[in-house]
Image (cartoon, grey):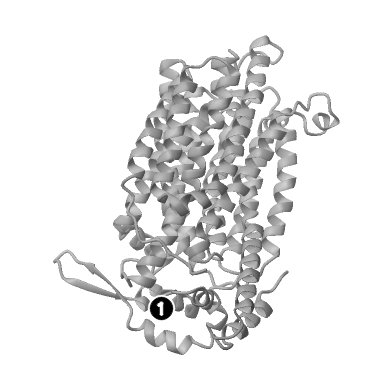
Amino acid sequence: MLSDSENVQEIIHLINQDPNGDEDDASKLKTRYNKASVLKLVILSLSAFGAEFFYIYFDMYAIPLQLKAGIPMALSSLPGLIATVIGLFLTPLISNMSDRCSLRWGRRRPFLIVLFVITLASNTIVTFGRTIGLDITPGDYLIGQILIFTGLCIAMIFGTTLLSIVRAYVMDSASIDMQVLANSLITCMSSFGVITSTILSGINWKNTALIKVFGGQTRVAFSLSSVISILITFISVICYREIPYTKENNDEAADDTSSTTSETDEMKVLIADSNAKENSQQNDEMNDKTEIRSQSSENKSKIITSDEIRSWSSLYQTYYLAKTMPKELFSLWITSAFGWLSFIAFIMFYTNFVAESIYHGNPIAAENSTAFINYTRGVRNGSWGLMGYTTISAIYSLLTIQLTKYIDKRYVIAIGYLITCVATAVMSLANDIVVVNIMAALQGFGFASIFNLPFAILASYHHYFTKEKQDQRWVFREYGLDISIIFTSMNVGNIIDCLFLGLLVSVTNTNRTAMIFSCIFSGLCCVSALFIHKVPDVHVNE
């Protein structure tokens, strides 16, 4: 495990040298510091690989696996609905607990490891549930259906929470001017997880020895992807020592209102955690003066101190901070909700759309029938369209680092979803697999936008309203909870899609309905992005 302590001490020493000294030394320090920071963010963001693999696995195979187990199409969205309703409340609670976790392992890492293990186990049950059920009760699918249904619920609940914890894990280590980079790296690593999964799903394993070992195409792809995810996540969580949460660290984050007008000042803020214990007495005194003012029912000012907030249970803290969500965060949430409504509708039904509407397959036909073979072929070939979207999302997420230097983040989101809207409209009308997969690939512009930039905007809110404006609405808010609040927009999108789309597809008897639904909400996301609250950009002197 690498330690930053020696580097921090050397940086402190160089910062405190004569400011009129050799400019070359300062330049070398800045270059060395930036390279070390980028490398650290790259390694930490590896944790997004496994998290996104599990999430995309649910999206790709939730419906096909249920249909193969005999679960009706009308009920196929029910696990997602149940999981997202529970996750709507559970994800912010767990994220808020991670904000204040004081274990010596760190504040995020313990949650990351536990959630990863739970999600891996539940997806394993989903993958092998049908066979396990038939082994227990030969000829009866009921136990297999129960295992798959339960596993999908657990995988969805904790998979979404894992995504939130992973993002906080990386953003905690990024300075304000590196937040777009940090979130872009998360998107890239997430895309690599999806690409790996889709490549392994797209390969025909029928004539290999692995098919005999694991017993099916889906099982081979899942097993190989799981092994890779375990190794990559292990690297991410052991390479750097996460600074544990303490009262002093939290107070310093809340009370530090100094302006970062130069690169040297920015680095002083970043290394402040190393000196937290030395400054604890001073921070405690400052903290006593910190308060939140909220309006009571009698329109009188109610003062809530930090000590009082700390005395609350995690459940009530989560409720209070969610209830007092600032309007800037709410506008960001609305745009995210439209974006996720569009994307989830696409990803949830895409492979089934290709298998049934393009290849005219049937998931409940006899296993050796032409209809069933066509369905399996459609799911496999449709996965290449998903690989295309993840490839574009990885590339475009890196391009947003440069784009946001010249174009406002709001407009970059709007452009991404305008492309997505047009692509989905074409997809809903097309009958050729090449055209459909190309249009699916263009979904990467929207995914990279909604999976990256809202969180970078959130980081700018935290910096501007706490450090520059000293806005009491924001001073006690932490990344973990606010990231999870934005992720609840994904939960809401899942709930709406699960409530209506499965039913709409059954009523209209075509999966094209889901693509039209996705197109409509892409357009709404494009428009709503223009109304996201803007704060002044942070500029770091070169």
- Up-down relation of residue 10 to residue 65 (above or below): below
Horizontal side, residue 446 vs residue 274: left or right: left
How many numbered marks, from 0 up? Answer: 1
Q: Is residue 147 above or below residue 140?
A: below
Residue at the right extreme of this rendering? 209
Amino acid type, residue under disc 1 in the picture: Ser
Outermost residue on the left side: it is 298
Residue placed at 30% from the left, 60% from the top? 324
Report whether residue 316 is seen: yes
- Using a 10 Å C-alpha cutoff, classify the residue at mark 1 as few (fewer than 14 neighbours), some (14 to 19) or many (20 or more): few
Q: Quadrant of residue 128?
A: top right
At a point 43% along the width and 64% down the height, the residue shown is 538
Tell me the element at label 1: loop
Quarter in which the N terminus is drawn: bottom right
- Residue nearest the viewer, comparing 92 with 9: 9
Check disc 1 and report the residue beneath it: 258
Residue 153 versus residue 244: which sits nearer the camera? 244
